[in-house]
Image (cartoon, rainbow, N blue to C red):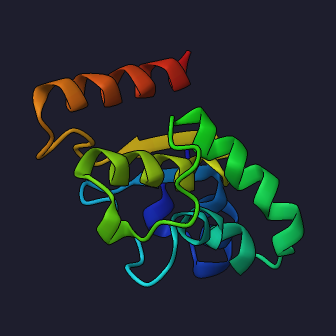
Amino acid sequence: GVDISRLGERELMQIRPKLGLVFQNAALFDSLTVAENVAFGLLERGQRKRKVLPQVEEKLALVGMEGTEGLLPAELSGGMKKRVGVARALIMEPNIMLYDEPTAGLDPPTAASLNELIVGLRD
């Protein structure tokens, strides 16, 4: 293992892309569409929108959110927002996924569905 608390910014920049983080509250940008939220990390790294769009569609389909690309976060339920957050983390192809209480605030059926998704992604 590596003690990251002793690393400088340059070394941390090499490690960060290997980690995927799904926040408890989904942490989506309110003014961006679902597709723009999922694509954000890749676009920030300089990838072209044309190249990123098929990846966005693939990751949204993987989490059961196909057809929502043009919606804003305000139009989504809590469970849908969390699935978009998972897609946004997955699109970066991380080696390790970290989840911050992914089912907090969800009703039992939605929480069970999200747990199934997470376990399925692991396997």
Image quadrant in which you'd find residue 1: top right
Residue 3 percent location from the top left of the image: 48, 54
Left or right for 75, reference 97: left
The count of marks equals 0
Which part of the image, by quadrant, shows the C terminus?
A: top right
Residue 121 percent location from the top left of the image: 54, 25
Q: Nearer the viewer, residue 49 or 69?
A: 69
Image quadrant in which you'd find residue 15: bottom right
Q: Is residue 66 above or below residue 70?
A: above
Residue at the top extreme, as displayed: 123
Q: Nearer the viewer, residue 121 or 8?
A: 121
Q: Residue at x 77, y 61 (%)?
A: 53
Residue 17 percent location from the top left of the image: 65, 59
Q: Residue at x 52, y 72 (%)?
A: 33
Q: Nearer the viewer, residue 7 or 60?
A: 60
Residue 27 visible in the displayed image: no
Left or right for 119, reference 39: left
Left or right for 114, reference 44: left
Residue 110 visible in the displayed image: yes
Q: Is residue 104 above or below residue 85?
A: above
Q: Residue at x 76, y 51 (%)?
A: 55
Q: Residue at x 50, y 18 (%)?
A: 120
Residue 91 percent location from the top left of the image: 66, 51
